[in-house]
Image: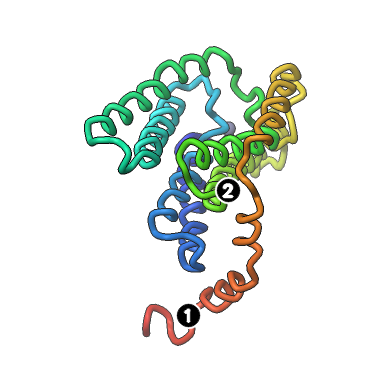
Amino acid sequence: MADFKTHLSVAGTLSGVLAVGCLQTGLAEPKDALLFFTLGAVGGILPDIDSDHSIPVNILFSCLATLAAFFSVFSKIGAYSIVESIILWVAVFVIVRYPVFELFKRSTVHRGVFHSLLAAVFFCFLSATLLHDVFALPSALAWLSSCFIVFGYLIHLLLDELYSVDMMGIRLKKSFGTALKPISFTYLKASIALIIATLALYFFVPELASFIQVVGDVKLYDVLRNNLLPQDGWFGF
Ligand SMILES: [Zn+2]
């Protein structure tokens, strides 16, 4: 499997490229593009959330806690005073970073259920729901943001599989096939719990129609075609 730095840099770079694409096609404003990039990078380390190595998981939970704290404050802009906003930021950060993290650490096994496509769908539904319901993002933007988490997540699973191929000897390491799989049959109980959680979340996800309308708009692809390469000379030359 790939290491933490590789996951973070590959997912971060590719999400950055995709976020710039969204910006250029008018799908995102600069602040959204920054959010997409961050979520893509977080998605790139999210499958190792149940890792036994403490540094990546600590960093990941610090990132998640910071994101949750900022989004909580953003969702209450104008409603709370400065002091209330600071209290809210600190409270959300501390809750996610410590009790939620501890609870999570105690209830997971590494490479258990999170290295699977089912987990990617679970995090897609979870992030879209949280971003829309808790952090007040419009549904289309919440879905688009969750697509970046899934994008980073899939890059992670793919990288883990690539690293389990020994290129020199052209043979497969024992870990081949343990990352990119629909669901984990080894941890059947946990997988069933994850299926139930994903199905339950489905009833809370934001409406999809406006997201489909945005990404299905033919004008978007015209803009993409017209802006993909420079019309007259690279970088103005
Ligand atoms: Zn991994």
Amino acid type, callout 2: Trp
N-terminal label among 1 and 2:
2
Question: How crowded is the residue under tag 2: few (<14 C-alpha within 10 Å), some, or many (20+)?
Answer: many
Marks 1 and 2, how far apart in space? 30 Å
What residue is drawn where x is 50% and y is 41%? 131
Q: Quadrant of the N terminus?
A: top right
Q: Can residue 160 be seen in this view?
A: no
Which residue has dot 2 on it? 143
Tag nearer the camera, 1 or 2: 2
Find residue 113 and report its image quarter: top right
Report helix, strand or loop for mark 1. loop
Where is residue 142? Give x, y as percent.
Answer: 53, 47
Find residue 93 and report its image quarter: top left
Q: Which quadrant of the figure shows ligand 1? A: top right
Frontmost residue, 139 versus 38: 139
What residue is drawn where x is 63% and y is 35%? 204
Where is residue 221? Give x, y as percent.
Answer: 61, 71
Amino acid type, callout 1: Pro
Q: In this view, does 44 lie above or below 20?
A: above
The total of numbered circles placed on residues is 2
Residue placed farthest to the top in the image? 106
Disc 1 residue: CB within 8 Å of ligand 1:
no
Give the number of the disc on residue 187: none
Which residue has dot 1 on it? 230
Frontmost residue, 204 versus 124: 204
